Image (cartoon, rainbow, N blue to C red):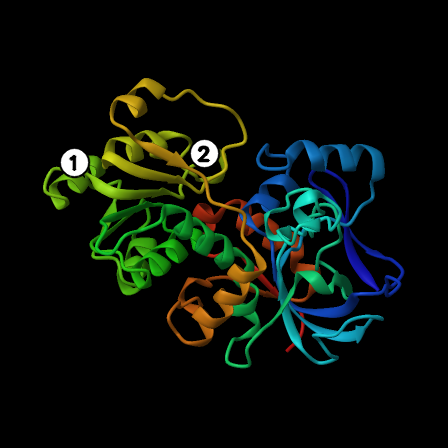
């Protein structure tokens, strides 16, 4: 079969490799649609972000190695011994972070909290290949009403579900979301159906603001055209928002906001409010912790997304409560187009992309 393998940062090649041997409690799948996450796209080019050191070590000691491809929709072509919940022909998506099944949490039936297990695409091969092997424990069935391209977004959506759950949003809470890329738009929709009151979104692109309004934002602010912190205070009776999601920060080289939106988020939240840090930055930065203490702010990071979160995302999309199709802006055909998908996703602002670029593998 063909599979993309990394020889180093920025050096990935479409190689002929053996079809993986089927193992007990695993399935073989043919990927239907796969997209690089924003994190994967940055790592592919050696840009420091989440898991940079882990990927660097693997490249130094194991290259060439199959990496990335944890956001996908695939069809099962063979099931291994012991697989009970899935059959050949089922379309599936998967949770990326897996339990180790050995630690005290796993052995006490709290495996959903385990962080010691492998991660698909980082420790285990993902779906940038003709065929992939996946553990049954990671899988969920994709409803027939969900397209292959929407199915590839489910894993990301489950992380956004976890982010909104972490906020413990109360009925009528005012919400601000900095960044209206895929996860910002997902947080918007989940907050809306979870009881949020006024929802204010912020981006620097007219197209993102337009989509944001269409998906339920009460106000979509273009940060190039106004003082967003002042506007947020005006829209919240001078108080600031109850909850602020920061989904815009990251490397300015890739068109993201650096750390500026973190500082804006701190100024935009009310005293006693909550900040949910969704973005990854790739390096430390200074923050005035005394200011957070003085204003009784809570800076929270999303809980790990679980199998239950992923199953819930299937219901949200199948029922129409969350819309994904309007966020999918770039679709490419064939496994050969994977490098282009990485380039677009690593530079979404340049290419005017909202969701990561998708690679359609089967029609």
Q: Quadrant of the N terminus?
A: bottom right
Residue drawn at x 78%, y 58% is 3
Picture coordinates of residue 328, whole percent (x, y)? 46, 63
> 362 and 304: which one is in front?
304
Q: Quadrant of the C terminus?
A: bottom right
For the residues marked 2 and 1, what is the alpha-carbon distance in whole angstroms?
24 Å
Picture coordinates of residue 271, whole percent (x, y)? 22, 32
- Say what secondary structure mark 1 lies in: helix
- Say what secondary structure mark 2 lies in: helix
Residue drawn at x 74%, y 61% is 135
Determine if residue 153 is in view.
Answer: no
- Residue under numbered circle 2: 252
Query: Is residue 189 depicted above or below 223 in this figure?
Result: below
Q: Mark 1 or mark 2, which is nearer the start of the sequence? A: 1
- Residue under numbered circle 1: 230
The image quarter containing residue 223 is top left
Residue drawn at x 59%, y 34% is 47
User: Residue 87, which numbered label?
Assistant: none
Residue drawn at x 69%, y 43% is 104
């Amino acid at each position: 079969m063909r599979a993309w393998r990394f020889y180093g940062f920025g050096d990935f090649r479409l190689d002929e490799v053996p079809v993986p041997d089927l193992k007990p409690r695993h399935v073989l799948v043919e990927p239907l649609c796969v997209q690089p996450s924003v994190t994967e796209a940055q790592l592919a080019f050696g840009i420091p972000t989440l898991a940079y050191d882990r990927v660097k070590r693997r490249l130094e000691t194991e290259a060439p190695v199959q990496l990335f491809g944890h956001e996908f929709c695939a069809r099962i072509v063979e099931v291994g011994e012991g697989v009970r919940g899935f059959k050949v022909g089922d379309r599936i998506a998967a949770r990326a972070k897996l339990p180790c099944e050995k630690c005290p949490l796993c052995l006490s039936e709290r495996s959903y909290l385990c962080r010691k297990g492998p991660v698909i695409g980082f420790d285990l091969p993902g779906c940038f290949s003709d065929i992939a092997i996946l553990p049954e424990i990671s899988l969920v069935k994709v409803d027939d009403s969900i397209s292959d391209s929407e199915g590839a977004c489910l894993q990301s959506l489950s992380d956004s579900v976890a982010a909104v759950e972490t906020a413990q949003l109360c009925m009528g809470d005012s919400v601000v979301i900095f960044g209206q890329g895929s996860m910002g738009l997902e947080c918007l929709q989940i907050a809306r159906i979870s009881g949020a009151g006024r929802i204010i979104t912020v981006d620097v692109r007219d197209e993102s603001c337009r989509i944001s309004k269409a998906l339920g934002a009460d106000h979509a602010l273009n940060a190039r055209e106004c003082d967003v912190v002042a506007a947020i205070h005006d829209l919240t009776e001078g108080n600031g928002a109850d909850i602020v999601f920061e989904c815009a920060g990251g490397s300015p080289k890739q068109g993201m906001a650096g750390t500026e939106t973190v500082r804006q988020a701190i100024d935009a939240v009310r005293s006693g409010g909550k900040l949910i840090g969704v973005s990854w930055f790739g390096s430390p930065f200074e923050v005035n912790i005394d200011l957070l203490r003085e204003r009784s702010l809570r800076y929270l990071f999303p809980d790990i997304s679980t199998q239950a979160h992923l199953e819930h995302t299937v219901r949200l999309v199948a029922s129409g409560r969350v819309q994904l199709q309007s966020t999918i802006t770039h679709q490419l055909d064939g496994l050969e187009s994977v490098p282009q998908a990485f380039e677009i996703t690593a530079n979404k602002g340049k290419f005017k992309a909202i969701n990561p670029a998708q690679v359609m593998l089967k029609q």
